[in-house]
Amino acid sequence: MSAAASAPAAPELDRPALNALLRAMPKAELHIHIEGSLEPELIFALAARNGVKLAYDSVEALRAAYAFTDLQSFLDIYYAGASVLLKEEDFHDMAWAYFLRARADNVVHAELFFDPQTHTERGVPMATVIQGLKRACDRAQAELGISASLILCFLRHLSEEAAFETLEAALPYRQHFIGVGLDSSERGHPPEKFARVFARCRELGLHLVAHAGEEGPPAYIWNALDVLKVERIDHGVRCVEDPALVQRLATSRLPLTVCPLSNVKLCVYGRMADHALPALLAAGLCATVNSDDPAYFGGYMNDNFIATFDALPQLGSAQAYALARNSFEASFAPPADKARWVAELDRCFSQHMQAA
Ligand code: HPA
Ligand code: ZN
């Protein structure tokens, strides 16, 4: 795919027309923790189904606790929410609910992170987790026309030895996931802590990604690239503090999966108007927009697009086109699928520009 991705030259759309375009354009989601799509209503329904006692009395009380000050304050609640997931059906139902939301946002391809250690530590078998998620992915393709794949994430607050054990337990299901990632508490857990397990995953032919530069410094991004040899950086927004790193990311077109609502909710930025997304695009990076943990951060894909474009006047139809196109370029989908989605994107743009 060519790196040059710009919208056909056209007069700028007014706000309602731009929002309609953002909603309608086909897009890929590359940074969604499927456990972060568990809405409070589903947490309570699964708790009732499985006889799990929650620390909150109601959906409203749980939602009221979603006031985060940083990544760790979110993770504590996020891991507690995941405790209702016990059976294969639970994993299927969670992912299916996400796919219905994704379809409504014109997501045509999704690469889902999942955190097996959050479940295996509670005695849930790896097979239960992976088979439930895989069944939802197959169903998304068959019933919604959404192409979907799974990326297994290692929890970085745990040891590399635990990551190796997780990889071992997942290998019988190797054909059901396309890659590995690194998530959870970033500060104090640099990428190089996982150098050996990522090297092993590379030998196995798995795709490699890692969260870096969300709360951690630019050095974590450098080491994710040079030590772990990742193909995408999740978040990565703190690259803007290091011009040489921005240059490296721009030249290589190594993608960043940016999550704007997440960044504001976790206080990476005080307000959306301060977000680095326009600067990243202007520098020529392959930046994408994603929802991260949509049930916790105030919205799914289109909510992220609209909140970002509303707050940042530098973003218009050219940036909308670049972001959608980048999402396909950055995906791990086969080239023929990417070409088909870009053609759909071009058709969608022509229609919206002509109607304006
Ligand atoms: N950062 C790190 N780990 C995570 C996140 C995140 O935003 N969401 C779920 N696990
Ligand atoms: Zn994330």
Image (cartoon, rainbow, N blue to C red):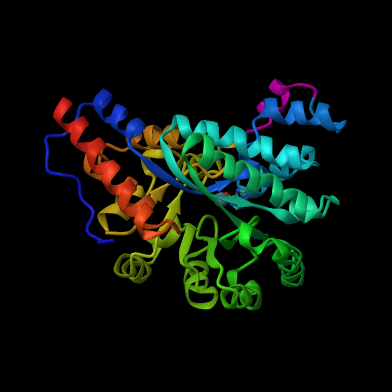
What is the tally of numbered marks visible in this picture?
Answer: 0
Q: Nearer the viewer, residue 336 or 47?
A: 336
Where 246 falls versus 37 (above or below)?
below
**Left or right of 150, for residue 87:** right
Magenta region: 57-66
Q: Residue at 29% of width from left, 69% of height from top? A: 251
Q: Does the magenta segment cover residue 356?
A: no
- Quadrant location, the N terminus: bottom left
**Left or right of 114, for residue 294:** left
Q: Overall secondary structure of the magenta stretch?
A: helix
Which residue is outermost to the front? Answer: 142
Q: Does the magenta segment cover residue 64?
A: yes
Q: Nearer the viewer, residue 331 or 135?
A: 135
Q: Residue at 26% of width from left, 46% of height from top? A: 343
**Left or right of 191, for residue 77:** right
Residue 42 position within the rendered picture, expressed as x and y whole percent measured from the top left:
69, 28
Whether residue 232 is visible = yes
Quarter of image, res 135: top right
- Quadrant location, the C terminus: top left
